[in-house]
Amino acid sequence: MRSLSAIDRIAEWTWLDKPAGMLRDAVSRTLRGRRLKDALHGVWLGHPVHPAVAQAPMGAFACAGVVDALPGRGVGERRVSQLLIKLGLLAGVPAAVAGAADFAQGHEEQQRTGLVHALANTAALTSYLLSLRWRATGREPAGIAAGWTGLGLTVAGGILGGHLSFHQATGVNHADAVPHIAPDEWTDLGEVADLPEGSPTRRMAGEVPVFVLRDRGELYVLADRCAHASGPLNQGSLAWPDGSPCVECPWHGSVFRVADGEVVHGPATAPQPTFHTRVVAGRLQALVRRIPGVPAGG
Ligand code: FES
C-alpha cells in the first residue's frame, strides 16, 4: 500500500474542490488580460515569478523574528522589527497575486494543496497585521507572540509551496527532459505526402511524442507534450498571428511559436523543444535540437 505523508494527503481532500473552484473563478474574473497574466506567470522571465518574489516577505519576516528574539531589545530594535514586518506585508502583495495567477491554471490536486498554501499565507499575513496593531497600541508581548505565530505560518506555507513545486510539479518545465531522451540520431516520421496540410499530427520520435506540422511548404516538428503541464499540443488550435504558425495548448491556453517553440503566451514559461527536419526519399526525418529556442526545420 502506498504510504502518504501528511502533506500528500491534502491533494486527496476532494472536499476542498468547491472552495478551490470558487477561488479559481474569482482569480480568473479578477486577473484579466493576457499581458497581465503573462507577466504574473513569468513568461518574460523564463520561469515562474511567484517562487522568486515570495522570498522577499519570507526573508523580511524571518529577520523580524530574529530582531524580536534579541535579548535586551530597545526602542531601535522595536522599530526595526516593525519596519521589517511592514516590508514583508508589502512584498507579500505581489507574491500573492503571482501565486494566484499560477493557482488558477493548476489541476485539481495542485489546487487543493494550493488552497491550503494560500490559507496558511493569509493567516500569516493576518497575524502580522495584528502584530503591528498590538505593538502600536503598547501591547508589545502580544505583538511579538503574533509575530512568532505569523512566522510559523509563513514556514508552513513555504513548506507547502515547496511541495507544490517539487512534488506536484507546479510551474516546472514539463518538456525539459525532451532534448535528453529523444534519439540522438535522425528519426523517421513517415511519408511527407501523408501529412495533412495546415493540420498538426502526432508521431513518435523514439519514446518522445512529437507534434508535426506541414504548413505552406515548411515542415515543423516539436515536442508534443506542453511545457506547462504536458497537454497534447497536436490537439490544440493553430493561428498565424504574424504569418508564422502558432499552436494554442488545449488544456490551459499556452501559445507557442511553432518555428522555434518560443512562448507567445503563458501559463507556460519555458519554450517547447524543437527538432531539425529533413526529407529523404519523400520521408520526413527529425533530430532533436539540444538547445530549446532555436527554429525547427532546416
Ligand atoms: S498543459 Fe497547461 S497550457 Fe498546456
Image (spheres, helix red, strand yellow):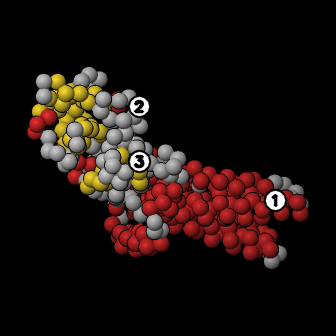
Q: Residues within 10 Å of mark 3 (few under 14, many from 20)?
A: many
What is the three-letter code of the residue carrying label 1? Val
Name the residue tied to disc 2: 291
Q: Report the residue at 62% width, 62% height from top.
A: 92
Name the residue tied to disc 1: 80
Q: Assign a secondary structure to mark 1.
A: helix
**Closer to the camera: disc 1 or disc 3?**
3
- Ligand 1 has an atom within 8 Å of the beta carbon of the residue at disc 1: no
Q: Which mark is residue 263?
A: 3
Q: Report the residue at 44% width, 61% height from top.
A: 34
**Closer to the camera: disc 1 or disc 2?**
2
What is the three-letter code of the residue carrying label 2? Ile
Residues tagged 1 and 3 counted as in contact (Cβ below 8 A): no
What is the three-letter code of the residue carrying label 3? Val
| Apparent side of residue 42 relative to residue 247 in the rendered image (left or right) | right
Give the Cα distance between marks 1 and 2: 47 Å
